[in-house]
Structure formats: C-alpha cells, structure tokens
Image: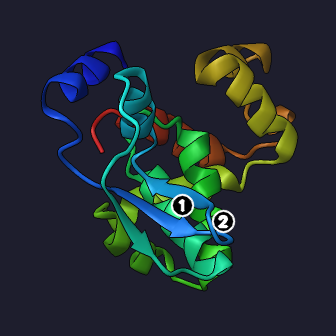
Amino acid sequence: MEELALSIRDVGVLEPLLVTRRGRKRFIVIAGHRRLEAAKRAGLDAVLCVVLDLSDGEFLHYSLIENLQRANLEPFEEAAAIKQLIELTGFTYREVAAKLGKSAAFVSERLAYWNCRRMSRRRFWRDGFRRARRLNGGRFRSSGCDGNCWSAARKATSSSSRN
C-alpha cells in the first residue's frame, strides 16, 4: 500500500475509480478501493472517478465480479462469490466463467467446493486441506464431505495460484 501511495503522490491516480451514487452526495466504490486508500495516504483531496448509475442488484453484480478478479482470494472466498453471483444473476457456470475470464472447469471446481457441508467448509477454512484430512484420519466421509468435494478442494487450492 505504501508503494502505491508513493506512486500516486508522484504521478497521481492513473486509472479512475468506478463508483455508483447512493443519495445526493454519497458514492460507493465498485472498483479501486486500494487506489482510493493510497490516494488518501498520499494526501490527495480528490480522485478521478467514473460514476455508473446502477441498481442495488447491478451494484452487487459488479462488485462480485470485481472481487473475483482479485488475485489474492482464497478458494472458499471465490466459491462463495461465484455461488452468490449465480444466485443473483441466474447465470450458468459457463456464463460466469466467461464473465470472469476463467475456464469453465475452474468455476465448476469452485462450485463443487461449495457443496461441502458447512462444518467441513469451516474446518477446511480454518485448518487447510492437509490438516483437515489428517484430523479425519485420512477419511473424507467422516468430516461430512465426500471424496468428490475433497478432490475439488484439493484442485482448487493447488490451482488457485495458476488461475
């Protein structure tokens, strides 16, 4: 963040933020949260923005897609956002893949990941795949998650740095 703030102090914000209006004088950032924070740290009073006129549903849709484009999401965060995007928009997993610039297999794996039972997701989130599997004595079903779910989880964690 400090490097970005120093860069912004030197040359300004090179790419405008995407925002939507909420009320008369209030705006919500859709894309550019880091740039806005860095601009504040750099001491800027204003930044260039593109204002989009969006409904609440459209705002959520844009926000989810923007968040899914971030490189540092955990696989479960991706799975939750993809699931929410599908529920919000009615898109198929192939349509979501196209919107995100990801493969259909990537999105399908994340959706399979989501199908793990809630407790398994919590355990996996907390402990990671290897520890969760070790806690279950190497068995998948005892955790409430079948082999396909764990297979998807394993693929998702190994591919998260590639996609």
Would residue 99 be found to the left or right of residue 153 on screen?
left
Left or right for 75, reference 160: right
**Circle 1 — which element?**
helix
The image quadrant that residue 43 belongs to is top left
Give the colour scheme of this rendering. rainbow
Mark 2 neighbour density, 10 Å: few (under 14) some (14–19) many (20 or more): some
Indicate the quadrant containing the N terminus: top left, top right, bottom left or bottom right. Answer: top left
Amino acid on which disc 1 is placed:
Leu
The image shows residue 74, relative to residue 92, as above or below, that is above
State the separation of the CA atoms marked 1 and 2.
Answer: 8 Å
Q: Nearer the viewer, residue 142 or 20?
A: 20
Find the residue positioned furthest to the left. Answer: 11
Residue 64 - label? 1
Q: Where does label 2 land, which residue?
A: 84
Quadrant the C terminus occupies: top left
Looking at the picture, how far across and down is residue 83, in whole percent?
Answer: 63, 64
Across and down, in percent, residue 142 comes to 85, 33
For the point 61% across and 42% down, the residue is 76
Q: Amino acid at mark 2?
A: Gln
Residue 138 in sight in this render? no
81 or 34, nearer to the observer: 34
Q: Residues within 10 Å of mark 1 (few under 14, many from 20)?
A: some
| Contact flag, marks 1 and 2 (Cβ < 8 Å) | yes
In this rendering, the answer to whether 87 lies above or below 80 is below
Q: Report the residue at 82% width, 48% height from top.
A: 117
Dot 1 or dot 2: first in sequence order is 1
Indicate the position of residue 42 as horizontal and vertical percent values: 34, 22
